[in-house]
Image (cartoon, helix red, strand yellow):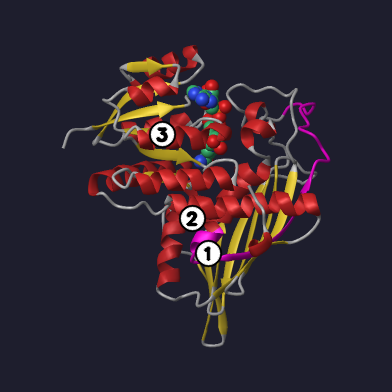
Amino acid sequence: MNKLKIGLIGAGSISNMHLQSYKNNSDVDIYAICDHNNQRAHEKAAAAYQAKTVYTDYKELLADRKVDAVSICTWNNTHASIAIEALNAGKHVLVEKPLCKTVKEAMAVAEAVDNNPEQVLQVGFVRRFGTNTQVLKKFIESGDLGEIYYAKASCIRALGNPGGWFADNERSGGGPLIDLGVHIIDLCWYLMGKPKVKSVSGNTYYKLGNRSNIKHKDYYKAADYDPDKNNVEDLANAMIRFDNGASLLLDTSFTLHAKEDAMAVQIFGDKGGAEIEPELRLITEKNDTILTITPQIDDLSFDFTKGFQNEVDHFITCIKEKREPISPVHDGVEIMKILTAVYESSKSGAEIHYEDSKME
Ligand SMILES: NC(=O)c1ccc[n+]([C@@H]2O[C@H](COP(=O)([O-])OP(=O)(O)OC[C@H]3O[C@@H](n4cnc5c(N)ncnc54)[C@H](O)[C@@H]3O)[C@@H](O)[C@H]2O)c1
């Protein structure tokens, strides 16, 4: 089989993880880079990854018949339209999280996937590809945790509003909930066995602004960092109920008067529990004694480089073997339903029940 020709759309910060992973995959040729920032597209193509072709208009990249597959690493408000056009142009798609901004858009992407059964669309739920997640999934599948009935997910940045488009609701769809919360909600939901969501109650807060006044502390910033605009929440929390009786408790922030950044993801079953972050541990009971088990694996925490490599390798394998990815579009739709319900619940001050939700 010839090498798959990859086109990358959106040559900002996260594109490096995609490009490096494609570069390490021997079945792939990084063929084209597109960014509407001409200089950025050229710099990334020429210097870093030797792509032969550069576009500033993604429509031109999609019209290029040599391109087999695309990574979409653009702002959230462009994911749905680019993904749909890419599928209709015959390309396989790896689209960054979140799938898009609204449930309506997510359903439109799902329809395009259904209309193009030859193409693979993988949602970039990269945490599913961490070694700690994959190891834990095996334990869950063999019944070691029993019935999972509770999960708790927290991703707190004390200071870390990335600015630029991330802080512009029109382009991002929201703040830490849609940017960070999406990872840990998905991680728990996936490990819980993807139960059907029944209701969501959430709160969002706009108390601290982006705190761009803070000095002497570095943090992740959008490629076009701009502190002047910020209309996204700085904290979100939620209680998500599932129809099997399980529940998920979440909080996530871009900034909070917390001592430090902290990530904690835990799931609890009737036979055992597990901490996924900050480090994988299994908790169980044997001979009337509680045991904490530390697996002997290289990465007890999520390793970014390996996670992205596994994600990209999986995408390529699914294309070659005509398989559905482990993070298919329908999962993206379900996660979009949860995210939008948290915002809707916060706005209305009431719990959202799926039957009566008018989420768009
Ligand atoms: N999986 C992860 O862990 C992770 C981490 C960071 C970001 N992301 C996601 O990746 C995406 C990009 O984030 P980022 O941090 O790289 O942002 P960024 O601002 O650094 O880069 C985005 C790039 O996309 C370009 N762009 C935007 N719209 C475009 C369009 N229509 N056509 C061509 N180029 C366009 C911008 O010019 C910019 O260079 C977002 O969806 C974000 O949620 C995922």
What's the distance in space between the residues labelled 1 and 2, CA to CA?
Answer: 8 Å
Q: Note whether 313 is above or below 249 in the view shown.
A: above
What's the distance in space between the residues labelled 3 and 2, CA to CA?
Answer: 28 Å
Is residue 203 in sight in this rendering? Answer: no
Which element is circle 1 on? strand
> Looking at the image, which residue is at 24% across and 44% down?
320
- Label 1 with label 2: CB-CB less than 8 Å: yes
- Disc 3 residue crowd, few under 14, some 14–19, many 20+, Cα 10 Å: many
What's the distance in space between the residues labelled 3 and 1, CA to CA?
Answer: 33 Å
- Disc 1 residue crowd, few under 14, some 14–19, many 20+, Cα 10 Å: some
Q: Mark 2: which amino acid?
A: Leu
Q: Position of residue 102 (x, y in %)?
A: 60, 44
Q: Which residues are magenta?
A: 188-216
For this view, does 122 lie left or right of residue 98?
Answer: left
- Disc 2 residue crowd, few under 14, some 14–19, many 20+, Cα 10 Å: many
Task: Please tell me the numbered disc located at residue 71.
Answer: 3
Is residue 345 in sight in this rendering? Answer: yes
